[in-house]
Image: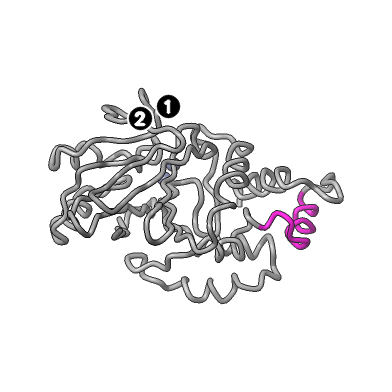
Amino acid sequence: MIVKQIWTGNDYRNFNYLIACPETGEALAVDPLDHVKCLSAAKDAGWDITQVLNTHEHGDHIGGNRQVIAATGAKLLAHENAKGKIPDIDRGLGAGDVIRVGKTVELESLDTPGHTMSHVCLRARTDTPALFCGDTLFNAGAGNCHGGGHPEDLYNTFASQLAGLPDETLIYPGHDYIANNLEFTLDREPDNARAPELLKEVADQDPAAALVSTLALEKEINTFFRLHSPSVIARLREAFPDLPDAPDEKTVFVKLRELRNSW
Ligand SMILES: [Zn+2]
Ligand SMILES: [Zn+2]
């Protein structure tokens, strides 16, 4: 499996992806908003885009579908419940569905509600474990829920699906928010051991050659995976004095998400 992360350079800081089979040159485009860059990257590599996949229905993820499909004849894949929200879906996806790209790439569709209620993540089942997570999980952060989602569902997705993936899973999110999110981590957990050095590393990075994190790294620096950290809980209590002594994970997650909305 070859992954090309494409930096759009737009105001929303979107990442688009091409996932290609090295044997056949067939490729799947994930959320190819910047259709010009996606099509030219495929052409440069000698790949044929045969499928387009939308992680969810927001305009900054589906806005390049028409142009990419017109140029390539690719089939469009998205969550089965996104029909009616995303035009012209050819294949609706449910949990556990397998998407094949060429001969060597197998991606599993995960049903991951929270950011929206018809959001899929892709888990690569080939050589290197990898997760294409749209606006569900970001580097050092989690998606917001004000465009049709619910924080309780986002928590359930994190706890029951993402947290259990292998530590070495590479994380490919839908946006570059890492520096800002690390600032939030440090605001919520000032004694976080890893975030300060990582922030220095990524503060001036070129998003076109962005650091690709792993799930193990996220568990160190992503507040939304650090729901038992005593300093996260102590800081949260300053904002929510009624927080119980040993709050459950879901309460901590939902309150962190609430603070992040106005941070
Ligand atoms: Zn979104
Ligand atoms: Zn987005």
The answer to whether residue 78 is above or below residue 12 is above
Q: Are marks 2 and 1 in contact (CB under 8 Å)?
A: yes
At label 2, counting other C-alpha atoms closer than 10 Å, the crowd grade (few under 14, some 14-19, many 20 or more) is: some
Q: Nearer the viewer, mark 2 or mark 1?
A: 2
Q: Is residue 78 left or right of residue 44?
A: right
Ligand 2 - quadrant of the structure image: top left
Q: Is mark 1 within 8 Å of ligand 1?
A: no
- 160 sits to left or right of 251: left
Q: Which residue is mark 2?
A: 92
In the rendered image, which residue does mark 1 sit on? 81
Label 1 sits on a secondary structure element that is: helix
Viewer-proximal residue among 165 and 261: 165
The residue type indicated by label 2 comes to: Gly
Q: CA distance from mark 2 to mark 1?
A: 7 Å
Q: Where is residue 136 drawn, in percent x and y?
A: 50, 46
Q: Is residue 26 above or below residue 79?
A: below
| Residue at image coords 40%, 52% | 125
Residue 66 among magenta residues? no
Q: Position of residue 13 (x, y in %)?
A: 38, 55
Magenta region: 226-239
